[in-house]
Image (cartoon, helix red, strand yellow):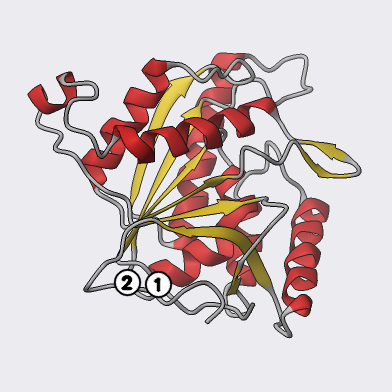
Amino acid sequence: MAATEFVPPSAMVVVAHPDDAEFLCGGTVAKWAARGCEVTYVVITKGDKGSDDPEMTSERLAVIREAEQRAAGAVLGVRNFEFLGYPDGYLQPTLELRRDLARLIRKYRPHSLITFDPTNRFVSDTYINHPDHRVAGDVALDAVFPTARDRLTFPELLVDGYQPWKVRQVWLATSAEPNAWVDISETVELKKQALLCHPSQIGPEVAAFVEARARAAGAVKGLEAAEAFRRFILEADPVHEAPPPGS
């Protein structure tokens, strides 16, 4: 299937940790934002466990990583940030988390939502997918459908003024079965710059590795660089209707 040039009017990226979004879809976010898409980042955990420094504390690391995430998002053109503050490494698919995500979907009303593919446990032969990643993807999907859509689910959201919302499209990153590729030839350098805004986690060698992966993904489709997704069109949109993946 060919690369898609579709750009939604608004998008939400739901991830587990600060820096996840840049890995998954930094090039796509930069491209969409530059073309007028309002992008919202939702970061579920504080990222407060990712350090080998014996002098580091969870409290300090959480502050550092939120600042890094805001800086990275600014490079890409992200408009809104939500940090839910769950502890890193302990994420569970709870109803509380599903309600938190449904509330934000109803608040920002994104046309499209990007998250992890929760079915991909083994991303490669050298990497077991982080359990927080799988939970983030799983609960984000449950929040999209049916929770954010249905009025009678979590009625307290209605009391607080959050009306039901139907997400039109879901884009799953790290999928073993992609069906949509976004050409990020113009934004792969911004993706690298955004990754390097996370110095507590990422060095130049990691950013170079991620760039190489994007270029390999692009080569499959004859592109300089790409990000691949499994894309679901859940709801036809008469204004921003997209063609089927790959058309």
Q: Amino acid at mark 2?
A: Gly
Q: Which mark, by number, is residue 36?
A: 2
Residue under the image location 79 percent in, 22 percent down: 52
- Where residue 75 appears, as percent x and y from the top left, is 49, 60
Q: Nearer the viewer, residue 90 or 175?
A: 175
The quadrant of the rendering that contains the N terminus is bottom right
- Where residue 89 appears, as percent x and y from the top left, is 64, 19
- Verify CB contact (< 8 Å) between mark 1 and mark 2: yes
- Please identify the quarter of the rendering in which residue 61 is found: top right
Sequence-wise first label, 1 or 2: 1
Does 76 sit above or below residue 85?
A: below
Does 237 sit above or below residue 42?
A: below
Q: Nearer the viewer, residue 94 or 44?
A: 94
Does 243 sit above or below residue 87?
A: below
Residue under the image location 38 percent in, 74 percent down: 242
- Where residue 232 appears, as percent x and y from the top left, is 48, 57
Q: Residue furthest right?
A: 125
Mark 1: give few (<14), some (14-19) or many (20+) Cα within 10 Å. Answer: many
Q: Which SS class for mark 2?
A: loop
Q: Which mark, by number, is residue 7?
A: 1
As measured in the structure, the alpha-carbon distance from the residue carrying label 1 to the one carrying label 2 is 8 Å
Q: Which mark, by number, is residue 129?
A: none
Residue under the image location 24 percent in, 24 percent down: 153
- Left or right: 168, with 85 as reference point: left
Q: Which SS class for mark 1?
A: loop
Q: Amino acid at mark 1?
A: Val
Residue under the image location 74 percent in, 36 percent down: 121
